[in-house]
Amino acid sequence: MPKDFRATTLERAIGRQLAGWRDERELSLTEAGQRVGFSSAKLSMMENAVQPSAPVDVMALGYVYKVPTPEWQAVVLRAQYAERARARSGGDGLNFDPAADFANLVFEATLLRVFTTDLVPAAFQLPGYTNAVLQDDDPVRTARLAMVREAWATRLTDRDPLAVRAVFPEAVLRQVIGGPRVMKAQLLHLMEVSEHETVTVRVVPRGAGAYPAMGSPFTLLGFPHRQHNDVAYLETFIKGEYVEEPGLTEQCAHRFASLQEMALGTGESLELIAEAAADL
């Protein structure tokens, strides 16, 4: 393993796939390791992406688990790409889709710092609100947003729950999406989730003027493993993108801190949300 290994999101997706293969066959780490000739520790580190998954090891697991050949070959190709990518930059990750993978990262994260510019954060959206945003014509994205909601809800009662720090401008509260009834339900839900001790919701008032990252929404994810750096997620209606270079994620963290300084406190933000709901 490299001296200071930091798993990319592609390598983490590979590990998740390996764990999925084993779970489908209802094998323990020890049982699977014995079959393939790995220690259970090595297999666990591969699945959790705390060490790289060598293509030959992926191939061996695919063979032992009797995974359909095209399926394990696709994962081997990704492992080969991930291996080469450590020595160079560029490429498309063999069609690795961050938008499809994002809910998995949310499930694994311990901290989300979310800045939105025109919508309620995905983790807190009600289905009616999401459907109104997407106008029922994007079932794939609708399903992905539902997975993000589910990931947050699942982690809410964990021993190590997912903390969410959300900041957005007041315009998010005033844009009546889906009509007054849908929007009021969404605002009341936002008030409800903000009562959780692991959630903070802060609003940038419309009188604040220009603010950092204006017009550029992003989510910054933090993780428990030392080998997993912070990851920024950016999305347009065309595609999603991960940003993993530490210097760039540090810029996101700095801008988020600046946004928090400009935003109202949690109590004042809650009052503003309640006021917007009462106006509907």
Image (cartoon, helix red, strand yellow):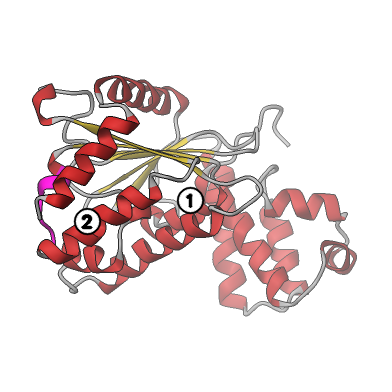
Amino acid at the residue labelled 1: Val
Question: Looking at this view, is 172 or 112 the one in front?
Answer: 172
Magenta region: 172-178
Q: Tell me the residue that label 2 is attached to.
A: 238
Where is residue 78 drawn, in percent x and y?
A: 54, 56
Label total for image? 2
Q: Residue at x 40, y 53 (%)?
A: 98
Quote the CA–CA distance across marks 2 and 1. 20 Å
Q: Amino acid at mark 2?
A: Ile
**Residue 160 coordinates in the image, percent (x, y):** 63, 45
What's the residue at 15%, 69% (across, down)? 135
Secondary-structure class at tag 2: loop
Looking at the rendering, in which quadrant would you find the N terminus? top right
Q: Quadrant of residue 43?
A: bottom right
Relative side of 162 to 37, left or right: left
Q: Is 166 drawn above or below residue 121 in the view shown?
A: above
Q: Residue at x 50, y 56 (%)?
A: 104
Label 2 Cα neighbours within 10 Å, binned few <14 / some 14-19 / many ≥20: few
Give the labeled residue for mark 1: 106
Residue 176 in which image quadrant: bottom left
